[in-house]
Amino acid sequence: MASFRFLHAADIHLDSPLKGLAGQEGNAADRVRNATREAFDQLVDLAMEERVDFLIIAGDLYDGDWRDYKTGLFFVGRIGRLNKAGIPVYLLHGNHDAESQITKRLDLPGNVHVFGTSKPETFDIGDLNVALHGRSFRHRDVTDNLVIDYPLPVSGAFNIGVLHTGLGGMAGHANYAPCSIDDLVNKGYDYWALGHVHQSSVLLEKPYVVFSGNLQGRHVRETGAKGARLVTVEDNEVVEILSVPCDVVRWVVLPVSLNDADSIGDVTERVRDALESAVGNEAEGRLLACRVLLEGRAEVHAQLVASEDQVLAEARAGALGLGDEVAWVEKVVIATQPAVDPRSLAQREDAIGELQRMFQDAANDDELLSRIESDIGELVRRLPHDVRAQIEDQVLKSAIEGDYGALINQVAPYLTARLMARES
C-alpha cells in the first residue's frame, strides 16, 4: 500500500487587513501588514522542504474580493513554485472567497485543482490511491448541509473530505454549511480536512476530523501559534499528524499587574519587563504582537486614565527598545481599579463625592435611562451588523446590548479618574 504525506491548511485570508494598524509606521507595523503573505510563503517553503505529495487548502484562501490583481498574482507566483516542484494543490473556496465574492480571475497553474460549486467533486490521485471529495461555496451564506450530497467513498482508496463548515457554530464562528460530527463519520471517509474555524483542533481520530486553524493570526482574538497540519499516511492509516507553525507574527494578550504601582515610571518598567519576558517565552523567534492589559488596584489609576496616549507611547517605546521587529504593541487596555474604594469616595463633601452619589442613583433612574435610550440607543442601532459584532469596548457593548445601567457603571470609574487626575 502507498505511503504519502500531505499538508492541510485553511483560512489563509491573503492580504486581509490586520487590525490595530491605523496610523502606525515602522518595520514592525509593516511586518504585521504583510503577515498573511509571509505566512503563505512559509507554507510553500514547508511543502517543498518536506517534499509533501500534495497540499489541501480548505477554504478562505482570500479574504474577499481583490482590490486589484496583486493578490491573485502573488498566489499564482507562489503556487508556481509548487508546480515546478511537482506538488499538486487541491483548493476549495469558502465563505470569504466564494465564487460570487471574487469578481476578478486569473488562470491558475496546472497543478491547482479547484473543487466546483454546483455539486461535490472528486479528484483521484491514482499513484497514491487517494480520493479527495469537496464542494466550494458559490455564495457566501451557505446554510445547507453540503455533506449530505458528498459521494460514497472510493473503495480501497484513502478518502479525504474537504469542507468549509461552522460545524454547528463552533467558537462563535458563523454556522456556514452546518453539519454534525455524525454526518462526517457516516460518510465513511478516512480524513476530514476542515476549514472556517480558526482554532486548530483534532475533533476525532476514527476517522480523523481536523480543523487546521488559520495560517496567520490577524488580531488579538487569534492568539498563539498558527499554521497547518502535516499528515503522514501508511497503509491507508494516519500514523502521524503534526501541527506545524507558519505564522510570522504571533499575537498575545499580556496581563501586567500594577498592584502597589504609584507612578507612571513604575508602570513603564513593569510593562517593559513583561514584554521582554513574553518575547523570550512565547515568540519563538517571531514578531510578538501584544495587547497589554494593565490590571490590579493601583495608586496610579487616575493618572493612567488621564494619560492613555502617554501610556501607549511608553509601551511602544519599551517594545522598540527590545530590538527591531521583536515586539509590537497593538493597544494598551487600562483595566486597573483605583486604590480607594468608590464607596469611600462617596463620603467626601466635594465634587468627587457628589459625582459618586449621582452615579449610585443613576443606574436606577428610569427617566435617565429612558433619555439614554433615546439619545444613544437609536444611534447604535444604525451601526452595521459587522461593526457591532466586532466591537470590543465594554462601554460600547453595553450600549449595543441596551444595558444602560451597566453602561453607567462602566463610565463612572472613568469620569471619576479623570476628575481625580486633575486634582492631583
Image (tube, rainbow, N blue to C red):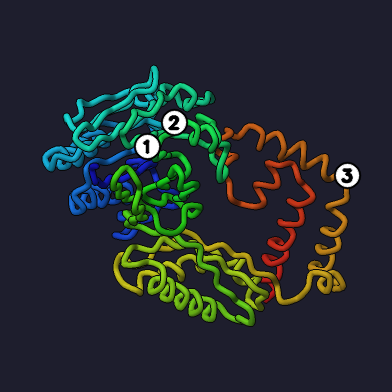
Please name the residue that numbered disc 2 is placed on: 95
> Residue 269, position in %: x, y?
48, 80
Q: Is residue 104 above or below residue 404?
A: above
Please name the residue that numbered disc 1 is placed on: 58
If the image is split into quadrants, where does the N terminus sit? top left
State which mark lies toward you, 2 or 3. 2
Q: Is residue 44 above or below residue 297?
A: above
Give the left or right position of residue 392, taking residue 355 as reference. Answer: left
Task: Give the spatial CA distance, label 2 vs label 1.
Answer: 11 Å
Specify the label residue 374 is tagged with: none
State which mark lies toward you, 2 or 1. 1
Label 3 SS = helix
Which residue is painted at 31% across and 34% down in the image? Answer: 157
> Residue 317, position in %: x, y?
40, 70
Query: How many C-alpha atoms fall within 10 Å of the one at disc 2: few (<14), some, or many (≥20)?
Result: many
> Residue 205, position in %: x, y?
45, 48
Identify residue type, mark 2. Answer: Asn
Q: Residue furthest top?
A: 118
Identify residue type, mark 3. Answer: Asp
Q: Is residue 287 visible?
A: yes
> Residue 16, position in %: x, y?
37, 42
If the image is split into quadrants, where does the C terminus sit? bottom right
Q: Are the residues at dot 2 and dot 3 in contact (C-beta closer than 8 Å)? A: no
* N-terminal label among 3 and 1: 1
